Image (cartoon, grey):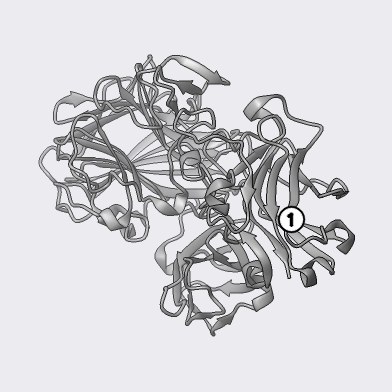
């Protein structure tokens, strides 16, 4: 959760939210009056369908292309910047747009080729509920962007570039005059970490409350841009498939609802969070691909043994059509995942972000699949192996390494980053914090690790392991120990786009193993052996866009 979530808010404050920071706000959620509010209804102004929620929100949807062309809350227009509206992608083009009122619900339907998009309003609520049904790849990605007028919500946070114009990478990473970096990519958060994204002035809050991402791709630990703030205006996103640093193919079908929510300055109502939201009122609206709660099932596990309780565990289930996840209880590993579409899924248990167990599970409509205790084999967790020394934790992330926390919300060139160079001494007590979280061919390749061995240890061959979480441009480690040099390993499958410079270390976890012969070690136990780690690749460019990799853990097995 963002460290700002429970902080007093002001005009220059933003809010990223989780269930732990749940708040309530006037007329913010489904608990608002369900009876028709005064003024609730829709009209046609010739160009748009105009919806009055009967609360404090009036919005307009273009009859031509399905754009959201106006968001007026308490008489103030919030929508739009640079002549652009809010919409799927960058706008769908000419579409078939229809409107229908069913009791206390108004539904606007947008059809663009095989893609269908929906806006719904509920009487007396300051919310817009949205669904997007993407049937194929005729639309390149799946996002909805709420464009917000300049000056409505100001901030200078990592995902803002209001106060800087100096581009340092591509056209989307910027540097301030004080050396700090800014980019829309620097959200800090994984999907599992937040329920809503937005801003508040203290008296008005505007948020996008995310959906359950069942048709999204990338799993619970995926990082994507969530919002941006610039001199021109701001953007809030619901991104369901984004090609950057993506580890999965996109999924198709109906996703939602996600919610545009206005409040009187507080967080959106927790009743809107994907884990709590009920939409029985939408069951009969005719939304393409909609599956009611009665057509879904549940998976529950009584416990998980073989865990290292120093780490959080997450259970995910996924197939080509849908993905879901839930946290395992720290005391016993119990987990429950509800609202699941029927089907057979691969179940994965993650220690941190490292997969340590997989199996298959089948879910049926209206049923609960109860699993007996899952026993994680000791050999599945690389952290259980006996090691002469180990740097970092085997948890699928670079946490604990130098600059690791900063890299989820800053560019590697940021002035706040500690030096990317410098060598490491095993036994110093600072092995992990001194070891850089990322290694690049053009920045810090050739890093040295010094360590001593006993006579018995030096008399035997040993396996050295380097775990990585992603790589850029096929960067991978080749090692030498004293006068011995390993072969160049083949590159594992990793995303082909930027990652390390846009706030994400999440790719495919992979372990490189090196069989180091006994002849490589020094026989003088008073001397340090020297491990040298080079990054090799025939791809990449220069500096922080040279071939690189993110480190999970390094150890020398006993």
Pointer 1: what residue?
Answer: 527
The residue located at (73%, 29%) in the rendering is 540
The residue located at (41%, 52%) in the rendering is 193
Residue 109, percent from left and from top = 41, 38
Q: Nearer the viewer, residue 160 or 532?
A: 532
Q: Nearer the viewer, residue 530 or 467?
A: 530
Above or below residue 53? Residue 18 is below
Res 247 seen here? no
Instruction: Specify the quadrant of the image occupied by residue 37.
Output: top left
Residue 468, percent from left and from top = 66, 51
Please indicate whether residue 360 sits to the left or right of residue 419 in the image: right
Residue found farthest to the bottom: 372
Q: Nearer the viewer, residue 64 or 15?
A: 15
Above or below residue 542? Residue 311 is below
As helix, strand or loop, the secondary structure at mark 1 comes to loop
Residue found farthest to the left: 38
Please indicate whether residue 193 sits to the left or right of residue 51 in the image: right
The residue located at (34%, 17%) in the rendering is 231
Above or below residue 104? Residue 440 is above
Residue 56, percent from left and from top = 15, 36
- Dividing the image into 4 quarters, which one contains the C terminus? bottom right
């Amino acid at each position: 959760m963002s460290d700002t979530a429970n902080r007093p808010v002001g005009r220059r404050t933003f809010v990223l939210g989780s269930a732990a920071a749940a708040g309530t706000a006037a007329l913010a959620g489904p608990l608002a009056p369900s009876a028709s509010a005064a003024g609730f209804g829709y009209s046609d102004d010739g160009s748009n369908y105009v919806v009055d929620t009967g609360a404090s929100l009036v919005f307009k949807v273009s009859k031509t292309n399905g754009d959201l062309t106006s968001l007026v809350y308490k008489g103030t227009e919030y929508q739009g910047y640079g002549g652009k509206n809010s919409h799927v992608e960058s706008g769908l083009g000419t579409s078939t747009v229809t409107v229908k009122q069913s009791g206390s619900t108004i539904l606007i339907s947008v059809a663009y080729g095989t893609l269908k998009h929906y806006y719904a309003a509920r009487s007396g609520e300051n919310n817009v509920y949205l669904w997007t049904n993407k049937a194929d790849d005729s639309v390149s990605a799946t996002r909805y962007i709420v464009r917000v007028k300049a000056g409505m919500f100001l901030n200078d946070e990592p995902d803002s570039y209001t106060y800087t114009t100096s581009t340092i990478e591509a056209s989307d990473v910027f540097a301030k005059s004080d050396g700090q970096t800014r980019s829309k990519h620097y959200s800090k958060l994984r999907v599992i970490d937040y329920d809503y994204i937005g801003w508040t002035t203290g008296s008005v809050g505007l948020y996008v409350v995310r959906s359950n991402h069942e048709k999204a791709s990338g799993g619970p630990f995926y990082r994507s841009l969530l919002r941006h703030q610039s001199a021109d205006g701001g953007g809030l996103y619901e991104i369901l498939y984004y090609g950057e640093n993506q580890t999965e193919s996109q999924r198709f079908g109906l996703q939602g609802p996600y919610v545009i929510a206005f409040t009187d300055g507080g967080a959106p109502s927790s009743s809107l969070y994907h884990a709590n939201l009920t939409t029985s009122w939408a069951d009969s609206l005719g939304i393409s691909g909609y599956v009611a709660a009665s057509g879904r099932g549940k998976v529950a596990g009584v416990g998980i043994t073989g865990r290292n309780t120093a780490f959080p565990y997450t259970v995910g289930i996924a197939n080509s059509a849908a993905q879901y996840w839930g946290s395992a209880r720290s005391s016993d590993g119990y987990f429950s995942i509800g609202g699941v579409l029927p089907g057979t899924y691969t179940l994965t248990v993650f220690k941190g972000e490292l997969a340590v167990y997989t199996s298959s599970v089948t879910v049926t409509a209206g049923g609960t699949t109860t699993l007996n205790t899952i026993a994680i084999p000791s050999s599945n967790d690389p952290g259980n192996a006996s090691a002469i020394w180990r740097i970092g934790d085997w948890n699928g992330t670079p946490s604990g390494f130098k600059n690791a926390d900063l890299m989820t919300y800053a560019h590697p060139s940021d002035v706040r980053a500690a030096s990317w160079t410098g060598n490491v001494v095993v036994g110093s007590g600072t092995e992990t914090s001194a070891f850089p979280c990322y290694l690049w061919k053009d920045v810090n390749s050739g890093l040295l690790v010094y360590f001593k061995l006993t006579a018995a240890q030096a008399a035997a061959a040993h396996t050295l392991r380097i775990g990585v979480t992603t790589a850029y441009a096929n960067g991978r480690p080749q090692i030498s120990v004293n006068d011995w040099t390993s072969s160049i390993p083949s590159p594992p499958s990793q995303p082909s786009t930027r990652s390390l410079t846009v706030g994400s270390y999440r790719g495919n976890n992979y372990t490189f193993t090196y069989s180091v012969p006994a002849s490589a070690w020094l026989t003088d136990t008073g001397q340090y052996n020297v491990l040298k780690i080079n990054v090799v690749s025939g791809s990449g460019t220069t500096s922080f866009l040279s071939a690189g990799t993110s480190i999970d853990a390094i150890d020398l097995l006993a």
